[in-house]
Amino acid sequence: MVRAGALAARTTSAEETQRLAASLAKLALPGDLLVLAGDLGAGKTAFTQGFGRGLDVTEPITSPTFTLAQQYDGRLPVHHLDVYRLDLLGEVADLGLSELLDDGGVVLIEWGDAILPMLPSDYLEVRLTFGAGDDERRVVLRSVGPSWARRQVSLLAAVAPWAEAPDDRTAGGTVSGTTTGDVAGGPAGGPAC
Ligand code: ADP
Ligand code: MG
């Protein structure tokens, strides 16, 4: 699989991640799907809050862990799902994702990478990983399928304020290689567990 076109950004606070997400939300179209990947506490919910803000959602967006899916009204309807509790996979099927995607809104799924076989193969993957400092996050965006790939130039512009300079990856002296590598595993001296 080709990983062409992945964009990397860096944020240093939750507010910054939210602003980045709000900037991306300006590009949102009816039927869009965003797959949010990253460990617990990486910022998937924070990202969704910012994305909602960018779509003029005024109601507070909270973690839907126990409700599985939550809908918010904005410029487009926002469907926020969290499939962390994998025992609820059956319920994900019951939700009728295709109906959600068809209703003219945007669907954001936390831990969506865990249910890729159940998803259409046309989405924006947003992968959040921990950075060197407590409040630092790396945000890697990857268009899968045509609908976000078509917006690549706009995506670049939307994240430009937070874009990671190519040299940043080696600034800590621990990362080498190219963006084709997996980002799993914290290379920047994260806590051993
Ligand atoms: P997730 O949904 O991935 O489990 P949350 O968004 O619920 O993560 O939590 C992220 C936590 O990390 C919040 O407490 C947030 O304030 C904090 N945080 C610190 N720095 C950042 C950052 N750069 N981006 C996002 N969240 C951050
Ligand atoms: Mg969350």
Image (cartoon, rainbow, N blue to C red):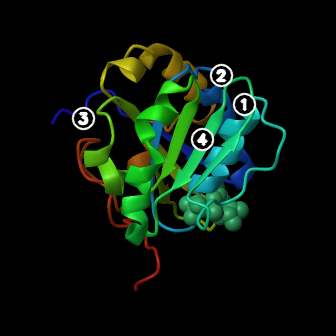
Q: Which-is-in-front pick, marks 3 and 4?
A: 4
What residue type is disc 2 on?
Lys
Say which quarter of the image contains residue 3: top left
Badge 1 marks a residue whose secondary structure is: helix
Disc 3: residue Cβ within 8 A of ligand 1's nearest atom: no
Label 4 vs label 1: CA separation? 14 Å
| Mark toward the start of the polypeptide (2 vs 1) | 2
Q: Are dots 3 and 1 in contact, CB under 8 Å?
A: no
Query: Where's the C terminus, which quadrant?
Result: bottom left
Q: Say whether marks 2 and 1 touch (CB < 8 Å).
A: yes
CA distance separating discs 3 and 1: 27 Å
Q: From mark 4 to mark 2, how far is it between C-alphas?
A: 16 Å
| Quadrant of the drawing holding the N terminus | top left
* Image quarter for ligand 1: bottom right
**Amino acid at the residue labelled 1:** Gly
Q: Residue at x 43, y 18 (%)?
A: 152
Which dot, 3 or 1, sits closer to the camera?
A: 1
Rendered image: mark on residue 26: 2
Q: Quadrant of residue 140?
A: top left
Identify the residue at the far bottom of this view.
193
From this view, report whether residue 113 is shown above or below residue 189. Answer: above
Characterize the local packing of mark 1: few (<14), some (14-19) or many (20 or more) Cα atoms within 10 angstroms.
many
Q: Pointer 3 and pointer 4: residues touching (CB < 8 Å)? A: no
Residue sticking out furthest to the right: 58
Specify whether 189 is left or right of 47: left
> Which mark is nearer the camera, 3 or 2?
2
- Badge 1 is on which residue? 54
Q: CA gap, disc 2 to disc 1? A: 6 Å
Q: Earlier in the sequence, mark 4 or mark 1?
A: 1
Question: Residue type at mark 3?
Answer: Arg
